[in-house]
Amino acid sequence: MVGTQHFWDREAFKGATEEVEKLGGKVIGVDGGRDNQVHANNHDILLSRKVDAVISILGDSAVEPKFKALRDAGIPVFTVDHVSQYSVNNTTSDNYTLGSTIGRYMADELGGKGNVAVFNAFSSALRICGIRYDQWKYVLKDYPDIHIIQPELAEQFANSPEDARKKTLELLSQYPKGKLDAIHVACWDQPAIGIVQALEETGRDKDVKVTAIDAGPETLEIMAEPGSPFVANVAQQPHLIGQTSADNVARYFAGQKLPVQTFIPVVPVKGPQEAKAVYKQLGYGELQ
């Protein structure tokens, strides 16, 4: 596991470990603390323990030689949100639908025209983020009156809401009312929390719309508020992703043929009422 600091990470880890135990397996968990190199090195621990299989959640290219070493030792690797030539199966959200759907939703909210700023820190480093960003941008090619502001913004992972809040305040000072119509977060949605805060602080929450990807409980709660500037999102199902990866391990050991990738459906969310419905649908509780 690359880390458990983020809701998505925790839910995917929980889904995988609970399912392994339900199926009668024993879990040996390692946590990279959201450091990709530590995450990669943790695979050496699993290799030395001679585990029967590895479910590796997230990570960047640093894990590839570790995956190769595991495979060479006869230990099958199953990945979550990480395509690898050494993985038996990668279980992931349908990232193509994630990106294209949020692109369409944002374009609809803007009426097909406007200036958009985008937080896009991870599309080069993480394949899943690149797919989401590329699909979003591809959709916008059909809307020539939507313009992406340059340079793009880059959020930090650590304390991302506060980092995004500060960067949004600076952005708003550069683009007064009428010059900025939307802010999009290309890969996830924690920065959107700070973006909304900045818009509310400056009284810009009525003229700048916010879109993002993930739709965890915190951001769905913001979307559910009347008049929220956070108008569209696409929900992932991280618990189901982790659970499905564990099920795929069981299928593999049962001799079943697995696809190279298993895609888990995503759930589009537009507006307060859909936010409340999806919040309940995904088991987060009920919003009034």
Image: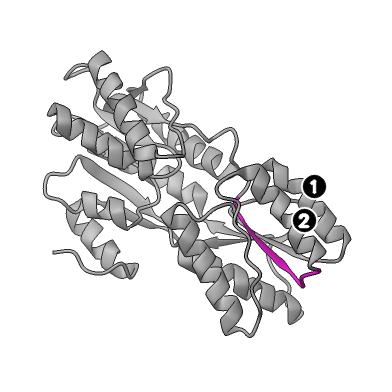
Q: Is residue 146 above or below residue 225?
A: above
From the viewer's perspective, tell me whether residue 213 is left or right of residue 172. right
Decide which of 11, 96 is in the foreground and name it: 11
Disc 1 residue type (three-letter): Pro
Q: Is residue 21 above or below residue 80?
A: below
Where is mark 1, residue-wise?
65
**SS for callout 2:** helix
**Residue drawn at the location 55% of the way across and 47% of the way down:** 34
**SS for callout 1:** helix
Q: Quadrant of residue 99?
A: top left
Q: Quadrant of the N terminus?
A: bottom right
Decide which of 236, 57 is in the foreground and name it: 57
From the viewer's perspective, tell me whether residue 127 is left or right of residue 203. right
> Magenta part of the protein: which range?
50-58
Q: CA distance from mark 1 to mark 2?
A: 10 Å
Q: Nearer the viewer, mark 1 or mark 2?
A: 2
Can residue 141 be seen? yes
Does 135 appear in magenta? no
Q: Is residue 88 above or below residue 141?
A: below
Where is residue 103? Give x, y as percent: 38, 39
Where is mark 2, residue-wise?
44
Disc 2 residue type (three-letter): Asp
Where is residue 13? Give x, y as percent: 53, 64
Q: Residues within 10 Å of mark 1 (few under 14, many from 20)?
A: some
Q: Quadrant of residue 27?
A: bottom right
Where is residue 42? Give x, y as percent: 70, 54
